[in-house]
Image (cartoon, rainbow, N blue to C red):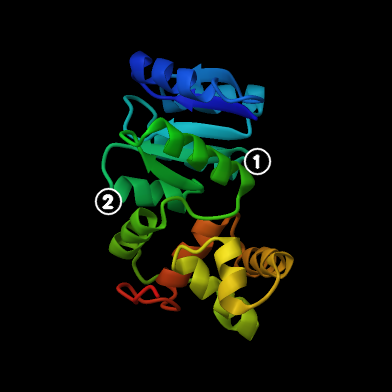
C-alpha cells in the first residue's frame, strides 16, 4: 500500500510515518505540508491512501480533497481532525473524502482505519461519522432514489446506520458478494464515488432521518 501524509506539523508527519511504515507492505511515498503541495504530490506519486489534515495554512485539506476528487484521483482520502463533530469535516467528506479519524486515536486504530479506507468496504468509526452527517447534512436537491430496488434501499439504509458489508449480509440474510453488488449498484445509480457520499445523499434526500435509531 502506498501512502501520502499531509499535515502542516512536521512532528505529526514524523509520528504518522513511523506508525504507518511499521506495517509490512506499506510505504509512505510522500509528504506535504499544505493542500497545494498535497495535490501536486498525489498527482505525481499516485498513492492508494492520503492522510489529509483539515486545517492548514494556505490551501486547506477541504480544497485539496475537492480538487483531487474533481480530477478523478483514485486515491482514498482519510481526513485527520482534532474535533469529532466539525462542519469542516463534513464538507471534506461531501467533497469526496472517504472518512475521518481523530488525531488522538491509538496507533492500532489508525492502522485499521487505513485498511478499511483502502478496501472501500465500510464507513470509518460509524458513530462519529454518522454524528457529523446528521448534524450538518441539510435537505438539498438530491438524486432520485426511486430508481433503487427494494433490496438496494434496504442496503442503503444499513449503510446509513454505519454497518459494514459483513454486518449487512448478516442482517439481510444474503451473501457478502450480493451486498457488494448492491453497494456498487447504489453508487452508480446515485452518481457518487463511495459509501460515505451515498450516506450523505440518503440524509440530504430525506431517505434517512437524523436521529433515526440504530438497531
Q: Quadrant of residue 82?
A: top left
Find out whether the residues at labels 1 and 2 contact each other: C-beta distance under 8 Å. no
Point out the image quarter for the N terminus: top right
| Nearest to N terminus: mark 1 or mark 2 | 1
The mark found on residue 23 in the picture is: none
Residue 120: x, y in percent? 60, 50
Q: Position of residue 42 (x, y in %)?
A: 59, 27
10 Å neighbourhood of mark 1: few (<14), some, or many (≥20)?
some
Residue located beneath label 2 in the image = 85
At x 55% / y 46%, what residue is drawn?
116
Residue 201 visible at all = no
Mark 2 crowdedness (10 Å alpha carbons): few <14, some 14-19, many ≥20: some
Q: Is residue 205 visible?
A: yes
SS of the residue under disc 1: loop
x, y percentage for residue 155? 58, 73
Residue 202 in percent (x, y) is at 47, 71
Note whether 189 is above or below 96 in the view shown.
below
Could you say which quadrant of the image residue 152 lies in? bottom right
Circle 1 residue: 74
Mark 2 secondary-structure assignment: loop
Front in this rendered view, residue 37 or 10: 10
Rendered position, 12 above or below 195? above
**Quarter of the image where the C terminus is located:** bottom left
Amino acid at each position: 500500500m502506498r501512502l501520502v501524509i499531509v499535515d502542516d506539523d512536521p512532528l505529526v508527519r514524523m509520528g504518522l510515518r513511523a506508525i504507518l511504515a511499521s506495517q509490512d507492505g506499506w510505504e509512505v511515498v510522500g509528504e506535504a505540508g499544505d493542500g497545494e503541495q498535497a495535490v501536486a504530490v498525489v498527482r505525481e506519486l499516485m498513492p492508494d491512501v492520503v492522510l489529509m489534515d483539515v486545517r492548514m495554512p494556505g490551501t486547506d485539506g477541504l480544497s485539496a480533497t475537492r480538487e483531487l476528487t474533481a480530477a478523478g484521483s483514485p486515491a482514498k482520502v482519510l481526513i485527520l481532525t482534532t474535533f469529532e463533530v466539525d462542519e469542516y469535516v463534513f464538507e471534506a467528506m461531501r467533497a469526496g473524502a472517504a472518512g475521518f479519524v481523530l488525531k488522538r486515536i491509538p496507533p492500532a486504530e489508525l492502522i485499521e482505519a487505513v485498511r478499511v479506507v483502502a478496501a472501500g468496504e465500510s464507513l470509518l468509526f460509524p458513530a462519529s461519522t454518522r454524528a457529523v452527517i446528521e448534524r450538518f447534512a441539510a435537505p438539498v436537491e438530491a438524486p432520485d432514489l426511486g430508481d433503487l430496488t427494494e433490496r438496494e434501499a434496504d442496503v442503503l439504509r444499513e449503510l446509513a446506520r454505519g454497518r459494514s458489508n459483513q454486518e449487512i449480509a448478516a442482517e439481510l440474510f444474503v451473501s457478502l458478494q450480493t451486498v457488494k453488488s448492491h453497494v456498487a449498484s447504489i453508487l452508480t445509480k446515485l452518481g457518487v464515488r463511495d459509501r460515505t457520499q451515498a450516506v450523505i445523499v440518503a440524509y440530504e434526500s430525506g431517505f434517512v432521518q437524523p436521529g433515526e435509531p440504530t438497531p
